Image (cartoon, grey):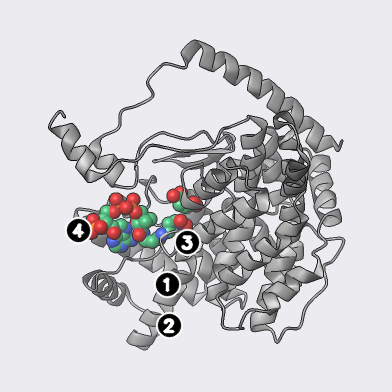
Amino acid sequence: MGIIKERFKLKADAANAEIKDLLKEHGNKKIGEVTLAQIYQGMRGITGLVSETSLLDAQEGIRFRGYSIPELQKSLPTAIPNGEPLPEGLFYLMLIGELPTEEDVHHVTNVWQRRSHVPTHVFKAIDALPISTHPMTMFVVGVMALQTESDFAREYAKGISKKDYWNPTYDDVMDLIARLPRIAAYIYRRKYKNNEHIQPDGLLDWAGNLAHMMGFEDESFKELMRLYMTIHADHEGGNVSAHATHLVGSALSDPYLSYAAGMNGLAGPLHGLANQEVIKWIFEMQKELGTDNPSKEQIEDYVKKTIAAGKVVPGYGHAVLRKTDPRFTAQMEFGKKHMPDDKLVNTVWKIYETVPPILQSLGKIKNPWPNVDAHSGALLVHYGLVEYEFYTVLFAVSRALGVLANLCWDRALGFPIERPKSVTTSAVKRWLKGE
Ligand code: NMX
Ligand code: MLT
């Protein structure tokens, strides 16, 4: 057994024993109440899931196993001195629950390098789609084609014992994460770079290799990819992509099927597709105003026009957060360090000064502050990655780290099939009448 797998098994056995005791003693305690409004309004605020890898605080933002993004930037191993964290380290932290050493991170990089081979039929499946297909559709088709490789599905068909589900799940998770950069880069080069592909570099880290295979050799772009892959990886368990992956996995669908389901959710404009919507919205604003350097007054008018047209301002608002997303702030810091004079990046900062008071004045929006998607596109455009339909694929590669680490835990903790109760409005009316 590999060293990380062995450590995970030890941690999972200890957690299983702890949870068993916890439920024995406190299993009947109430954790909250559910109102009628909540079941009609997206179950907002109902605690109904366990997700060990990260926890979101409405005021402070995300913490991964207790560590904030600035803390991770100080404590996770990096590829270059004083550089951004290597996402391999975050994956280790989410899976094992402890900060990795440099050696642990190198080990994860090597394991993912070793497991990164993508079979030819996956590329053929992507190639069968028209070139106009959205990159997220190509991505999910690629992941689904890769499902032929699932150890879990094979072992289950043979008749594996319940107590061993975690084992092939772990192997599928490591294989799948290892192969995603190749699939993502293949889609990028196929759709936007004349189908001219770049072979992986066996000496690069996971995110650096993604940048390389996409055709971006600038060291500061590789650093951006390391930061990007780290900050988008997880946002506790209730967001659409994490919840969908967990839900589908609870039916014992293998990690390929479960992750593909989650990524179909990430492809929605209120979730991960918002990153492409932000840049599209800014480009449309620039075109309409006839300038790439709009004033605050011009932005204000454009925002009001967007709202009057019954549309959302992309990149703003959140179902849980009530302050500026620390993932936005981390990207803003990156921008200040690497491209302080970039016009588009400065426009994003001007939008940040302009939008919150307008949204606040409407009186109905619970969070007027920017989320992660408000910033990411402008940094990518700076390096020449202007094909904004591709942006959600980058989010998806990163999100694999969180949702798949979670899937390992789901199977190791023996979580059952998820099946909440639903009601009809007629049933609600009968219940209100006391019938
Ligand atoms: N622009 C305009 N209206 C908004 C916005 C916004 N950015 N955010 C919320 N609202 C509206 C919302 O549509 C709703 O209107 P109505 O009552 O007429 O249906 C009202 O304000 C109350 O919504 P909230 O309770 O504040 O937000 P909710 O929790 O339902 O939704 C989002 C959260 C993130 C879906 C929502 O804020 C939104 O649509 N934002 C824009 C899209 C976006 O940036 N999504 C990315 C989220 C991060 N991610 O990567 O997943
Ligand atoms: C996420 O990263 O998943 C988004 O911020 C959405 C969410 O947390 O609901």
* Side (left or right) of 151 relative to 422: right
331 over 9 or under it: above or below: below
Give the structural element (helix, strand or loop) at label 2.
Answer: loop
Say which residue label 1 marks: 347
224 vs 230: above or below: below
Which residue is disc 3 drawn over?
Answer: 373
Q: Which residue is mark 4?
A: 362
Asked whether mark 4 and ligand 1 are closer than 8 Å, the reply comes as yes
**Disc with the residue nearer the chain's start (3 vs 2):** 2
The amino acid type of the residue labelled 2 equals Asp
Question: Ligand 1 near label 1 (Cβ, under 8 Å)?
Answer: no
Q: Position of residue 185 (x, y in %)?
A: 70, 71
Q: Could you tell me residue 38's position as x and y percent?
A: 28, 40
Asked if labels 2 and 1 touch by Cβ distance under 8 angstroms, the answer is yes
Disc 2: which residue: 292
Does residue 164 sit above or below 364 in this rendering? above
Which numbered disc, 4 or 1, marks the residue closer to the eye?
4
Q: Are marks 3 and 1 in contact (CB under 8 Å)?
A: no
**Tag 1's secondary structure?**
helix
- How far apart marks 1 and 2 lie (CA) works out to 8 Å
Q: Which residue lies at the image location 70% right of the left edge and 64% below the top edge?
A: 145
Answer few, some or many: residues within 10 Å of disc 3's Cα (few below 14, many 20 plus, some between 14 and 19).
many
